[in-house]
Amino acid sequence: MENKVEELRRRRGVLQEELAAAVGVSRQTIGSLENGRYNPSITLAFKLARYFETTIEDIFIFEEGD
């Protein structure tokens, strides 16, 4: 699953550490998300969407077969 976490974070001028603190995860989790090595829980996906004031679908790109 692809995502736009890094793009959205950079647009806001926020460090990985700051985003991690805001959504209650570690900086390593944010790094893994950005590198596509980690798929978030639904709770984390909702927290990220709320933080970026957008929808889950605008952050995470699901393609059939993923």
Image (cartoon, rainbow, N blue to C red):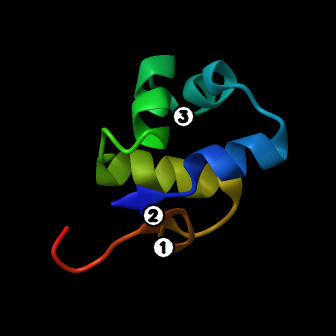
Residue ID for mark 2? 60
Sequence-first disc among 2 and 3:
3
Residue ID for mark 3? 23
User: Dot 1: within a 10 Å radius of its alpha carbon, few (fewer than 14), some, or many (20 or more) residues?
Assistant: few
With 61 as the anchor, is 13 left or right in this view? Answer: right
Residue 6 placement: quadrant: top right
Residue 13 placement: quadrant: top right
The mark tally for this picture is: 3
Which element carries disc 2, helix, strand or loop?
A: strand
Marks 1 and 2 close (CB-CB < 8 Å):
yes
The Cα–Cα distance between marks 2 and 3, rounded to whole angstroms, is 16 Å
User: Dot 2: within a 10 Å radius of its alpha carbon, few (fewer than 14), some, or many (20 or more) residues?
Assistant: some
With 16 as the anchor, is 30 left or right in this view? Answer: left
**Label 1 amino acid?**
Glu
**13 vs 50, nearest the viewer:** 13
Q: Residue at x 30, y 77 (%)?
A: 63
Q: Where in the figure is residue 21, as x and y percent of width and height? A: 59, 22
With 65 as the anchor, is 42 left or right in this view? Answer: right
Taking 65 as reference, is 8 above or below it?
above
